[in-house]
Image: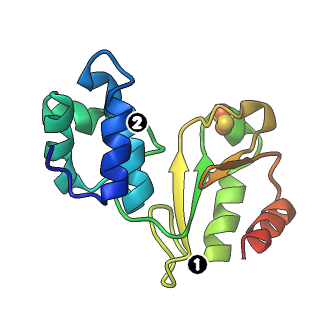
Amino acid sequence: MSLKLSPQSMKRIKEVMTHYPNKQAALLPILHIVQEEKGYVPAEMEADIAEAVEVPVVKVREVITFYTLFNRQPVGKYHVQMCRTISCTLCGHRELLKYVKEKLGIEAGQTTADGKYTLSVVECLAACEMAPAMQINEKYYGNLTPQRIDEILTGLK
Ligand code: FES
């Protein structure tokens, strides 16, 4: 296996591979480990990951692009992902997105100059019951209002 990762991550990958009946089944956990170390899944690692789990490179790319939780580019310290699917849109997503863009001074898909925030617009976060919702790193936030967003972002500092 020729993945360019730390010895700790390689140890975790080898261990994870023992949990599954075939190497292909370890693809998702391996992608998580790569992202934990790098902050994203670099395109130049796709071929090595594919080789490690014995699937075509296109399969790795399909999985990375299907799940919005995998970043294809480096992201800021806080990755703000705002849901734009129907429940959130009906509950004010567009106005909140505009608010966050103005507050952070960036467009969706961009990172602030200080590397602190990346803003993304994503499909349903499976948190529709608390729409409008967003995810920042691993944590979910719902019933958003401009005031609540201010509190959340202030709490991150
Ligand atoms: S529609 Fe936004 S979380 Fe489901």
Q: Is residue 14 left or right of residue 132?
A: left
> How far from the left and from the top, in percent, is residue 59?
22, 30
> How far from the left and from the top, in percent, is residue 127?
70, 34
Checking the image for residue 128, the label placed there is: none
Q: Amino acid at mark 2?
A: Pro
Q: Is residue 136 left or right of residue 68?
A: right
Colour option used: rainbow
Q: Quadrant of residue 104?
A: bottom right
Q: Is residue 57 left or right of residue 145?
A: left
The residue tagged 1 is 105
Where's the C terminus, which quadrant? Answer: bottom right
- CA separation in Å, label 1 and label 2: 34 Å
Q: Categorize mark 2 by other alpha carbons within 10 Å: few (<14), some (14-19), many (20+).
A: some
The residue tagged 2 is 29
The residue shown at (38%, 33%) is 16
Q: Quadrant of ligand 1?
A: top right
Residue that extends furthest to the bottom in the rendered view of this protein: 114
